[in-house]
Each structure stands twice: as structure tokens, then as C-alpha cells.
Amino acid sequence: MAGTTNKPPDVLRDLLVYLLREAAEIEHQLMIQYLYAAFSMKKRPDETCTPAQFEAVRRWQSTVYMVARQEMEHLALVNGMLTAIGAEPFFDRQNIPLQFSYYLGRNLQEGKSLPDQPCDIPFMFERFNLPVIQRFVCFESPSLETLRQSGDPIPDWCFSCEGQYPSTSMGERLRGEVRDRPLLFPLAATRIPDDLLAAAREEMARLGANLRSVSGETLRPGTIQELYDQVEDLFRFLASRWNLYTGNPNQQVFVPVEYQINVFPITDLPTTLQALRLIVEEGEGIDAPPDFQSHFLRFFDVHDQLVALLARDPLFDPSLPVPVNPSGGAISNPFAKDLFELFNYTYATLLLLLTALYADFQPQAGQSYPFFSSALQENAFGPMMTMLLRPMAEIMAYTASGDGEHTTGPSFELSAEDRALLREPAKLGNIELFLGRLQKITDDLAVLTRADLAAAARTADDVPFLDRQLRFVSESATAMTNNMRRIYQIGQLPQFVVAP
């Protein structure tokens, strides 16, 4: 066996980095699709959602939010793996809608040894309904063989293609109208360059390596299951022969337990395997302990409960009419358009903040003035998501788009400028960049609080909810800006305050 003091071949380390970037983007894309569905779910009973039905909606929304939060956990763990091997963090992603090769029917058929080719499963934004929860089940489903061996329920719709995952509004469902043709979206660009794959094949052949996944033509994964197999195999292979973990172990991001996500330092092969095992168990439930509630099983339970309620009441509708794959160009309501654009700006700010945090994390005990890392960490995980993005999106779901049919939903669109910044962490080491962005968010929200909400709301009954949520978001943004400045200067971790 080769010694463990030298570094691995660049081409194989680079392949591992690209595989991890692919995994990071997939986890990120799943998370925001789940969030969009959760944002769309009703916040109170109405004419198509009785109080008893609304209790079910609340449970489902809590489940979908929990799964989305764990996808954030997976994204964070993959970034921990990147920084552990001395690579830059990766929070960039392509804008949806897209079709990823990992969810093409032909790849799923080959990768999961299916007798029939299943449907392509698109990445798209849709409100919560039955076809959407079916699509989410398929995202998280283990292979058919694994399901048969485990005795878990089998979602037949994931393993055949009798129909695509149509987005059906309540009106379409009542009229019996559904789309019978799949929506066609651009195929996502892979993160793994062809020339790197060719060079990696040559290097593996030179080393005489014979790994489960990383060999020959299978260097390009076909499914998510294969992707994580390859990540694990490469980690095991490289760590057993070379000094793979060149990142500073003291710069591994640790997330406080109150944020309810399990992010821990990754510093060696055992902690890497622990993280990979957690991701697979929480998602598909493969090799999880008995009675473990994976994302697959949680979504399957929601699906069955929704089917039962629709059977008793076909008029039941658990979500608001947010659009499929929203775009700013389709919004004519000025308030809704401004909030739509502000949401995307705030979301991009969170990703920039996370990138900067992972690029140069410093534990609180090891910091002195300026306390840059602490200032970022206090805003990175819980506050910006729960106190800014989530309430903003819930306001949008009750805000008229202006087309007379839909309310508004976020597109999570990243501008070319922000995507470029995400790929250059070295440019994010300035607190003024983040204070400036937070101040813009605060100023824009202050303007929105003075808007005519009666003209912006879906109905007059929605105005009190919009007013309450908007004021909460505005006060939260002010508190975050002030706290970031204060923590940066003196290192304290105060409760949220509004006064500077």
C-alpha cells in the first residue's frame, strides 16, 4: 500500500470534488422544490379546506418543511466534505426548471435495474397537490429491489410511465382535464467535464483499481444512488492510500443544536462515512434502523393521507394557486413583483453568506476582533430562512399576481452576477458586502410595509395576515442587520434586537 503522507493524484481528487459538487447541487435543488410546495400550503381554513382538513394540511406542511430542513443539512454536510479535502464550498446551482440526467427515465431504468422505463422526473416548482407529492416520493425512492427486500410500500407510479407528473389546478381536476404530455425542460449541465472523466479512467487503469462504482465506463454516474456510491468509493480509495484530508479541521462548520439540523465536523474517513450514511438513511432509508422515518416514508405517508381525504371530498384543495415555475415577467401587481424580486435577492444573500462562512470558518473561541465568522454564523442557518425567506414566501402565496387567477410564488432565481460571486469565495471576505445587502433588504421591506395591501392581497380577508407577516419580516431584517454589525465588532451573540 502506498504511504499516507503524500497527496492523491490531482485527477482523482478533482473527480471527487466534481462528484461532491454534483451532490451539493442535487440536495440544493430538492430543498427548494420542497420549500416551494410548503410555501404554497394554506395557512387557514377556507371554502375548499375545512377546519378538520386544515389540521391535516398543517401536519403535511410541517413534514415538508422538516424534510427541506434536512436537505439543507445534507447540503451542509457535502460542503463539509469539500472543505475537509481542501476544496472550496459550493452553494451555486442552475436555475429551475430543469431536467437532471440523474432523473431521466432511461438512467433510472438502468441504474435501478427496472423492467420498464419510468418517467423522466423534472425539477420544477409546483404548488402542493397529489401529483407533486407523488413526484417527491419518486425523488426519494430507493430502488424497486430494495423496496421489495425491505417490505416498505412500493410507489408503482415511480417505476412505470403511464403518465407524467401533471400539474393540475382544482379547476382542471374538477373538469377532468389533465396534461397527458410531459413538460419538456432543458437538460441540466453536468458538473463533471468529459476530459476529466477520460483522464480519471486512465489513472484508475494505471493504478489497477477495481472499485464497485468508479471503474471503466461507470465513472459517470446515472442515478443519485450511484452518485453517492461513487463518492463513498473514492473517499475510501483515496483516504486509504494518500493524505486526502488537507483542510483545516478547526475550520469545520458546526451548527448549534437549536437549529434542528445535524451538521457536524468532517475531518477524516470515519466522519465522512458517518455523513454519507446519514444522507442516505434520511433520504431513501437504505440500511436505516427499524421504524426509521426516511424522507421516502414520510412523503409516502403524506401521499396516502391526501389520497384518503380527496376520496372523501373531491373539492378539498390544500394549497393556494401559486403558479407553476413562476417568473417575474408574469407578475403585474407592483407589490407582488417587488416582493418577488426581493425574495430572490434575499435568497442569494443567504447563499453568499453560507459560502463565505464555509470558506473561512473560525470557531468562536478562536476569534478576536473582527468577529467576521461569528457575525455570519449567527445569521446563516436559522434566522434568514425562518425569519425572512419563509414569511416572505408565505406573504407571496396570499398576494395576487395580477393575472386574475394565480397568487405569487418565489422562483429562487440566481442572477449571473450572484452566481459568479458564489464561485469566487475569496471575494466574500468583506463584512461591508453583507451589511450592504442586509441594509438593502431592510430598506426595501420598509417601503413594502407602506404599500396598499388591500390592492395587493388576493382577497380582503388576507390583508390582516399580510400586514402582520410583513411587519414581522421588516423588524427581523432590521434586527439581523444590527446584530451582524454588533457581533462583528464585539463578538457578542445577543438575542435579536431592533435598536442599533
Image (spheres, rainbow, N blue to C red):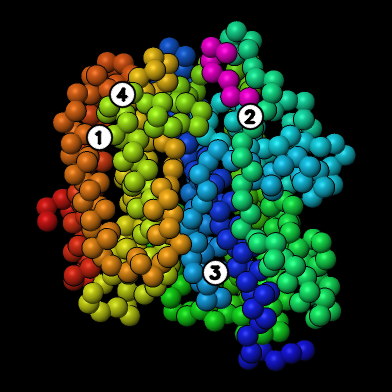
Residue placed most toward the observer, 39 or 205: 205
Foreground disc of the pair 4, 3: 4
Residue type indicated by callout 4: Asn
Q: Residues within 10 Å of mark 3 (few under 14, many from 20)?
A: many
Which span is picked out in magenta? 166-172
Residue 166, compared with residue 81, is above or below; it is above
Residue with the most extreme front position: 195
Q: Determine whether the residue tagged by mark 2 lies in a helix, strand or loop.
A: loop
Q: Which residue is mark 1?
A: 470
Query: Where, quadrant-wise, is the N terminus in this rendering?
Result: bottom right
Foreground disc of the pair 1, 4: 4
Foreground disc of the pair 3, 1: 3
Residue type indicated by callout 1: Leu
Q: CA distance from mark 3 to mark 1?
A: 37 Å
Q: Determine whether the residue tagged by mark 4 lies in a helix, strand or loop.
A: loop
Q: CA distance from mark 4 to mark 2?
A: 27 Å
For marks 3 and 1, the one nearer the N-term is 3
Q: Residue at x 88, y 39 (%)?
A: 115
Residue 127 appears at what percent x and percent y?
A: 51, 28
Q: Determine whether the residue tagged by mark 1 lies in a helix, strand or loop.
A: helix
Q: Residue at x 23, y 29 (%)?
A: 467
Q: Which residue is mark 4?
A: 333
The numbered dot on residue 183 is 2
Residue 263 appears at what percent x and percent y?
A: 49, 63
Q: CA distance from mark 1 to mark 4?
A: 17 Å
Residue 158 appears at what percent x and percent y?
A: 73, 35
Residue 368, compared with residue 350, is above or below; it is below
Q: Which residue is mark 3?
A: 82
Q: Are marks 3 and 2 in contact (CB under 8 Å)?
A: no
Residue 29 appears at what percent x and percent y?
A: 54, 47
Residue placed most toward the observer, 39 or 18: 18
For marks 1 and 4, the one nearer the N-term is 4
